[in-house]
Image (cartoon, rainbow, N blue to C red):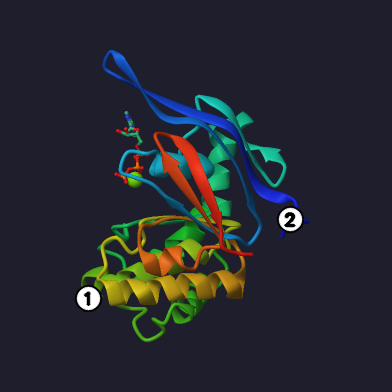
Amino acid sequence: MALKEPMVVLSDVHRDFALGDHIVHALRGVSMEVYEGEFIVVLGPSGSGKTTLLNQIGGIDSPTKGTIKVKGEEITEWGTGQLGDYRRNRVGWIFQFFNLIPSLRAWENVALALEFKGDRENIKSRACDMLKAVGLGDKTDRFPSQLSGGEQQRVAIARALVKNPEIIVADEPTGNLDFVTGEKIADLMKDLNEQFGGTYLVVSHDINITEKAQRVFYLRDGQIETVEDHSK
Ligand SMILES: Nc1ncnc2c1ncn2[C@@H]1O[C@H](COP(=O)(O)OP(=O)(O)OP(=O)(O)O)[C@@H](O)[C@H]1O
Ligand SMILES: [Mg+2]
């Protein structure tokens, strides 16, 4: 792994938020490298900057200071248009509360990611194939309200992966699921990582997920405190 070029490189990333008359230092000089195909977990207390960190890497937000490179390209130099393309085409998002559109069927929720990308060829069959890969081949026509929490998260994972993203960011993906369902989702994410590749950055306190990580980054007060390497 050490021989590969890093896929994502953060150098001294800071993110300040102005809140009324004071400034919140959400990230205070984060430097890290993530390799292609890695499964990384980010841990830390509430308010330590985990979501802020994912948002910088996923192109939802930009640092106040510091640089982020993805495959050698400095995304922190990009304007909103280029950053939007990056988000739509190259990053898959998985959220704690699934964020599915209730009025759309499972396959339509998945297909939407391809619509946004402007990639409409065989859209339904590709969405259904991805749902099959997450174990929902027989439920493609269900609405989110007709699915269990674990099944809804599977749809959300299919939506994140259908566009074949290079980077998958997940913020507490099992945080709203019971332990056993969370375990299945953790297994699924790791299987998909091995099957389709993709670099995973996952914020999670769930042991099911953290034990699958190659490396665990501990954040505290907006800084990386320690890194545990489980890959050796
Ligand atoms: N838009 C914002 N405006 C002001 N402060 C913010 C904003 N977003 C985050 N913060 C602050 O930045 C710090 C880090 O927030 P962040 O959401 O990254 O924490 P977290 O580690 O994800 O916490 P949790 O585990 O509770 O989700 C917190 O002090 C938070 O209040
Ligand atoms: Mg958070």
Distance from label 1 to label 2 (Cα)? 46 Å
Mark 1, other Cα within 10 Å: few <14 / some 14–19 / many ≥20: some
Q: Nearer the viewer, residue 30 or 68?
A: 30
Q: Quick check: is the Cβ at mark 1 less than 8 Å away from ligand 2?
A: no
Mark 2, other Cα within 10 Å: few <14 / some 14–19 / many ≥20: few
Q: Which residue is mark 2?
A: 2
> Looking at the figure, which quarter contains the C terminus?
bottom right
Q: Position of residue 158 (x, y in %)?
A: 45, 69
Q: Are marks 1 and 2 in contact (CB under 8 Å)?
A: no
Residue depicted at 33% across the width and 64% down the height = 174
Q: Position of residue 47 (x, y in %)?
A: 32, 38
Residue found at the far left of this picture: 145
Q: Which residue is mark 1?
A: 146
Classify residue 84 as left or right of residue 102: right
Image height check: is 196 above or below 31? below
Q: Amino acid at mark 2?
A: Ala
Q: Position of residue 172 (x, y in %)?
A: 35, 56
Q: Is residue 108 visible?
A: no
Q: Is residue 109 visible?
A: yes
Classify residue 74 as left or right of residue 108: right
